[in-house]
Image (cartoon, rainbow, N blue to C red):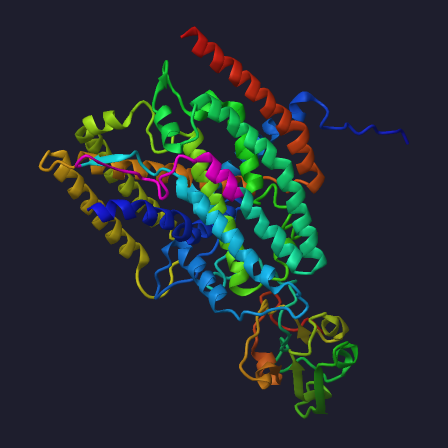
Amino acid sequence: MGIKTVKRHGDTFKEKMYLPAIFGGLKTTLKHFRDNLSDASNIPTLCYPEEKPKDITPTYRGVHRLTHRASDDSIACVACYMCATACPADCINIEAIDRTDGVDEKMPSIFNIDLLECVFCGFCVEACPCDAIRMDSGIYSVTGEKREDFIYDKEKLLSIKGISKEEYSLAK
Amino acid sequence: MNTLLILLPLILTLLYSLASVPLLVWMERRVAGLIQDRLGPNRCNISGIRLGGIVQSVADMMKLVFKEEFLPSHIKNKFYYLVAPSIAFMSAFLTFMVIPYADNITINEQVYFMQALPTDLGILWFLAFAGLGVYGIIIGGWASHNKYAILGSMRATAQVIGYEVAMGLSLVSIMITYGTIDLNTMVTYQSQTFGIIPAWGIVLQPLATIIFIVTAFAETNRAPFDSAEGESEIVAGYHTEYGAMKFGLFFVAEYIALAASGALIVTIFLGGYQLPYLTTTDLINNFELILWLIIGFAIVSSIFFIRWMKTHNIFAMKGVNETKVYTTLVIAFTVFVVAIMLFYALGLSHGSEVGVMILQIVIFTVKLFFLHFVFIWVRWTLPRFRYDQTQKLGWNILLPLSLANIFITAIVVVGVNYGN
């Protein structure tokens, strides 16, 4: 480890005059001003909400969705309560019933997520053994007029489409 | 006609100070946005008409007017607390009174002054009222009975004694050069040429120009010398306890002070209402030729503006087609102005003196708005000076420089006069 001598600035006459540095700064800002005035399309500002962000990736934690099985398009969830247990905000409400079609043993009859409670931590996605709940919908803005509008039920969650390549549940 | 010409400078003063505040706020936001690669306000509209965002500053002012006026209960000196914003506002407004907007005009052997207050005091009036403006800040901060506010007003006090000396001394060298304190005489002096260069203050007194512009920034309490506000350290400084229109007055006062300083810089250093190489008599004698030039310029610039607008209306509001409306308005305005100017240019009517006056007012306005742009440009470029750095700059650098400048100027002026 050698000693690195950092060069101190501000001792020369030119630097003590202030003005050259000030004019340098003014030149930089004027360049930005001129460029943006002559071609406003270079400005990265999004005119939200008319313009939507284009850089939402499948890894973005958006609104949850419930996936379907690739075999028969039925619900992939087996109502194991893993997500509800992992949830730190206690916003998932599940009621299980027997599954009679022989595809699996259990399925949820009620699967409600209260998005006003949800902290979008993604623990439910990590906890799920069946890849049945995902947050790859890409929806970042949820609006509603009543509190009830923010409680997403099973049908609503199943209807949300994902933006990742894997449409169906990857569970075997 | 008589009354109109007497009232005109007063109306112009109101326009340049009060009416230009929304424009200045708009310029500040838009220029800041473009400098920082943003768009700036572009949404506020009256049924789809946004005027490029000017509506936003009108809406802001209306909000400030209609907000609840509150009086914090801990304030002991209610009179000073209430009077402080008015002092800041009034003195900023009164500084404008002595600025000449055009040369004195003689109609029917009566001389009309294009100053709102036709006085010889000129610079002294400016110095007196510009200095008084700081009292609004000091009293407001003190009467607020708040630690942040008092820190802000203490900073303002320290700053005012730091820069005011250098400011006054830089103006002394200007007075020696021009041999007068009357602003209109100064502008007439600047219409001379010095060999091939116009004898503008910026050419004759470059050092005084720099010192005065730097101190003018401090005078208006704007960046880089806005440590009295210092929102990163002391909340909002002197106006922490002010809300609604009481804050609004401080806010407007800052912009009027900016406009007044800009007007004085234009008058003293940038030739005022003069075009380089052309005195008022030259303008009156060659009025037709100048009108033809202006007609050409007006047509070309409005074509450029319309083309620029078509490509730059990035996002359209619902409602009226703004681009169409503005295009129609610009074309109508250009046609109207060109028609009036053609009337005079073809020699159909004799109105050259009034015409020259209007031309000079326009030149003054253009120069003034350039100065406004410089003020805004500097604000969004430079970081704030620390409060001791401002003092050091004022006492250690600007004061000796302005003293030296006075000596050199005096020697040169005495030498030249002796030679003659």
From the viewer's perspective, tell me whether residue B288 is left or right of residue B48.
left
Query: Is residue B275 or residue B82 the one in the foreground?
Result: B82
Residue B234 among magenta residues: no
Residue B103 image-quadrant placement:
top left
The correct choice, above or below, for B12 with respect to B84 in the image is above
Residue B199 image-quadrant placement:
top left
Does the rendering let one see residue B380? no
Residue B300 image-quadrant placement:
top left
The correct choice, above or below, for B417 with respect to A165 in the image is above
Residue under the point 51% across and 29% down: B171
Which quadrant would the C terminus of chain B be assigned to in this image? top left
Among all residues in the image, which is located at the extreme left? B348
Does the rendering let one see residue A2? yes
Residue A150 horizontal/vertical position (percent) = 60, 81
From the viewer's perspective, tell me whether residue B155 is left or right of residue B419.
right
Residue B121 among magenta residues: yes
Residue under the point 58% across and 43% down: B223
Residue under the point 66% across and 70% down: B73
Query: Is residue B145 or residue B367 the one in the foreground?
Result: B145
Query: Is residue B301 or residue A135 the one in the foreground?
Result: B301
The correct choice, above or below, for B43 with respect to B127 in the image is below
Among all residues in the image, which is located at the extreme top? B419
From the viewer's perspective, tell me whether residue A114 is left or right of residue B324.
right
Residue under the point 51% across and 59% down: B248
Among all residues in the image, which is located at the extreme right? A1
Query: Is residue B200 or residue B345 the one in the foreground?
Result: B200
Residue B230 horizontal/vertical position (percent) = 65, 50
Q: Which residues are magenta?
A: B108-130
